[in-house]
Image: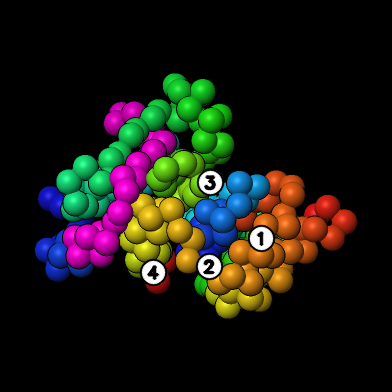
Amino acid sequence: MPLLDTKIQAQVRKALEAMAGPVKLVMFTQGADALECEFCAETRALIEEIAALAPAGKLNVEVHDFVAEGDAVGAYQVDKIPAFAVVGAKDYGIRFYGIPSGYEFSSLMDDLVAVSKGESGLSDATKAAVAKINQPVHIQVYVTPT
Amino acid sequence: MLAHRLAMESDWIRADMVEATEFPHLANKYQVYGVPRTVINETIHVEGAVPEPMFVKELMKVMDGQS
């Protein structure tokens, strides 16, 4: 049974029509028989449903096992699961931890389009300020479901 | 999400959206209640959803004394 109802599916399909280049969702989860990750299976199912609603070939899903694939975990700097990275022409360092629901779901749709275009959409003033950053910055945004 | 857009703009920045209810120990650690709480380099905290210029002002604090 799909997670997204037909109305939401239509909204997602429409939102993703704006995608330009291809985007990859790189997911980290545990095997199907694992008991420790409560939302892993649901998150995986959700992103696979979303990928199926994107224009052909524009959104692909790559799945890695958090426990077994240490190299991938290190390469993507993932420290907890479920997790997925939104990767366009390059890995911009965009991560989602946990299943994106409510407001965060529409954030994901916007992110997918922005990443497909490789354009942040930030103001010139913001871009100028950010260009001065010369050290690692890790931003974590904790959200609660609406 | 603004933090993700900032990550797009700089190779130095990486940004996570974290679903607080799925990671209660972290929600507790960062005292997350009901509204988005942003943590930058463990030390800079921003409460709620703030406009872009205000977020950038907080972000640029990383440049003061290597936060």
Residue occupying the far right of the picture: B65
Q: Is residue A58 magenta?
A: no
The span from disc 4 to disc 3 (Cα, nearest Å) is: 21 Å
B62 to A22, vertically: above or below: below
Q: Nearer the viewer, residue B14 or B37?
A: B14
Task: Kindly state the secondary structure of the residue where label 4 is placed.
Answer: helix
Answer left or right for A41 relative to B36: left
Q: Are marks 3 and 2 in contact (CB under 8 Å)?
A: no
Residue A130 percent across, percent down from the top left: 66, 60
Dot 3 amino acid type: Gly
Task: Kindly state the secondary structure of the residue where label 3 is placed.
Answer: strand
- For image coordinates 73% across by 57% down, the residue present is A132
Which residue was labeled with disc 1?
A130
Q: Earlier in the sequence, mark 4 or mark 3?
A: 3
Dot 4 amino acid type: Tyr
Q: For the residues carrying marks 1 and 4, which lies nearer the camera in this image?
A: 1
The span from disc 4 to disc 2 (Cα, nearest Å) is: 20 Å
Q: Earlier in the sequence, mark 1 or mark 4?
A: 4
Which residue was labeled with disc 3?
A93
Count numbered badges in the picture.
Answer: 4
Which residue was labeled with disc 4?
A103
Residue A124 percent across, percent down from the top left: 59, 70
Respond whether the residues carrying marks 1 and 4 are from the same subunit.
Answer: yes
Q: Nearer the viewer, residue B25 or B4?
A: B4
